[in-house]
Amino acid sequence: MTDKTTPIASEFEVQPLRDYAEKAYLDYSMYVILDRALPHIGDGLKPVQRRIIYAMSELALKAGAKFKKSARTVGDVIGKYHPHGDGAAYEAMVLMAQPFSYRYTLVDGQGNWGSSDEPKSFAAMRYTESRLMAYSNVLLEELGQGTVDWRPNFDGTLEEPQVLPAQLPNLLLNGTTGIAVGMATDVPPHNLREVAAACIRLLEEPKADIAQLMEHIKGPDYPTGAPIITPAAEIALIYETGRGMLRQRAEWVMEDGEIIVTALPYQVSGSRVLEQIADQMNNKKLPMVTDLRDESDHENPTRLIIIPRSNRVDTETLMSHLFSSTDLEKGHRVNLNIIGIDGKPAVKNLRTIISEWLKFRMITVRRRLQYRLDKINHRLHMLEGLLVAFLNLDEVIRIVREEDHPKQELIRKFALSEIQADYILDTRLRQLARLEEMKIQAERDELEAEKGQIETILGSATRLKTLVRKEITKAAEDYGDDRRSLIIDSVVESKSFSEEELMVTEPVTVVLSSMGWIRAAKGHDVDAAGLSYKAGDGLKTLAQGKSNQPVHIIDSTGRSYSLLAHTLPSARGQGEPITGRLSPPSGVEFMALQMGDLEQKILVASDAGYGFICKIQDLHANKKAGKALLSLPAESKVLPPCKIADIETSLLVAVSNEGRMVVFPVQELPELARGKGNKIISIPSSRVKSREEFMVSFAVVPDQKCVLVHSGKRHMKLKFSELDVFRCERGRRGAKLPRGFQRVDALSLEDELTDK
């Protein structure tokens, strides 16, 4: 016997769990997409926003009405139309009241509704008051005129509009953002006058393309007013595809040597920007800024002060760095994913959005006119009945007084409709007695004229378009304003400071020891030989430059290496082995250092008597293994490079160890990036290999300098004019120096005015 409490299998629907889960998830997804996250193309609102606006209109909170507590509105919204959390509903309401969030605010708030620095710092809804802005009439004015469809609310006790009858494409005007299941939307705000002009253009020229519409809509128009720096071609591509990225950059001016930021990108907090800049200052990554201030107030919603260290700071470069490293420049994603008039979500381009909205508007206006026409026909029908009653007033009174069924008798006697008879019977006797035929006729004539106009419009697509155009123009005149966000088509790309640019520039001396230890001392007046060295070590060479410059090292194979000067250890210690930072070939010796501006020209040579001119930047190597610079003949060695002050007037002086000297203009040597170079002084290669003869030293002598030739403890001074005695063609053996200088150790330079 079957237990009555046991369920029978036929009472249940059996289906695979996979199918059930898939259907349930898809149902949920479509609910989120259509009823929560994405806006409708008609009014540009999400369901919660639409319900807030409608609930406020039902509470008679139109523009000009007395403010009411926001909690009253939120209570009606969640109690009647939107059964979700009050916090979410109130936050959606706050967003529509913030002038820095909405281009054309829909809610007029009184109290603390947040600030651009802290948009979510608004007071609780029990403290704030609200009503609708005048602009909300664009959405609500035609609501009770049969323009839209209605649906039951969540519990079936009330009805709510499926969409509001917007007189302007609010979707483009205020934009929106939202995240659904598997899709999102990001529609930027636009200028009302520009959008209205584009709508009229497409209404009059249905074949107008996006380029023609962009003659009116130059681009988005954000409420904060910071300029848009996205090129026009990229904006056009965004409007073509419905997707892309827009960039906004803060607006700034110079006042009394201070940088004043007057407008910030959309949804950027001024306090956050100052915090970002202050972090860089604290981390010593912004030495050219000394102070920050926020002078924003009611009259100046955005006024951020950035004070440069001195008037020598390049403010354009500084702001370029700040644009790159802070929210002073920000990108906004564009994804025109919206619910079309077919009720389906899709990514649409600009022309499709305006075209679909115009279809929606044409349908709305046609429904409004038809609704009015039906009202007029109904009223004319009533007036016909009243006119009959007026012309037969005595008989009507008799029928009402004497007949048992006056309604049926009136219908039979005067051929009235049931509605007309009811209307006559519902009319008070004293009102009926005062009816005047002239007034009835006047009202009927007026209604007949209006009926004729409406029927003419409904019967002509051209006249309907004309009416829509006039209404769009009127709304634009009532609520339109000037563009806030300028569009700058050509702008320099922002660039952050490099590590070297952020360094505090100060003179440094880089010291290299004989055993290959390197360090850097502040200043140029450093006694390098007197520094502390390890036992058996001593000064090899040094180079003077700036802390933000690299130091270039040349080894005994002719390879060059680069290190950042500011990363070297302090000269207060003994430094560190250079091989710890570089990876040179085994057995090499580091011969020379070089520092200076990248464009500084230097002479690089080997003691085989070959050399060339290059720039310091040619010595730069990005790899630890360095790069080839100077090609060395067999058994030759690298000589220390020499800077060239004036290549056009300077002379090159070179001497061999046997006391032969050549002098010729330095510009006769070629300018190369690397290589062996050309012959400076002629020395047989066999003698170089045997180390019997080689070029011992060279110097580039500018005008007003003299050369000191050192031989042991003796030296000889040759003025610039006296060098002519040794002038010859490049690559010659050279002339013999005077007796006593057959063995030359080195050359050095000295000012001609110096007496020694």
Image: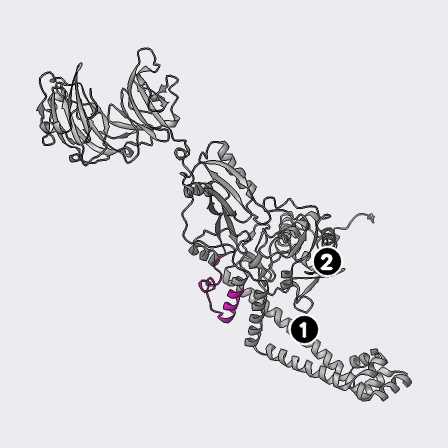
Q: Amino acid at mark 1?
A: Tyr
Vertical comparison of 487 with 366: above or below: above
Q: Position of residue 313 (x, y in %)?
A: 41, 39
Q: Name which quarter of the figure residue 61 lies in.
A: bottom right
Q: Position of residue 54 (x, y in %)?
A: 69, 59
For label 1, the residue is 371
- Mark 1 vs mark 2: give the one in front: 2
Placement of the C terminus among the 4 image quadrants:
top left
* Segment tinted magenta in the rendering: 196-219
For label 2, the residue is 66
Q: Is residue 215 magenta?
A: yes
The residue sitting at the top extreme is 535
Q: Position of residue 371 (x, y in %)?
A: 67, 73
Find numbered disc 2 in the image and state the secondary structure of the residue it sits on: loop
- Name the residue at 51% across, 34% down: 279
- Mark 1 surroundings: few (<14), some (14-19) or many (≥20) residues within 10 A: some
Find numbered disc 1 in the image and state the secondary structure of the residue it sits on: helix
Kindly tell me whether residue 85 is visible in this rendering: no
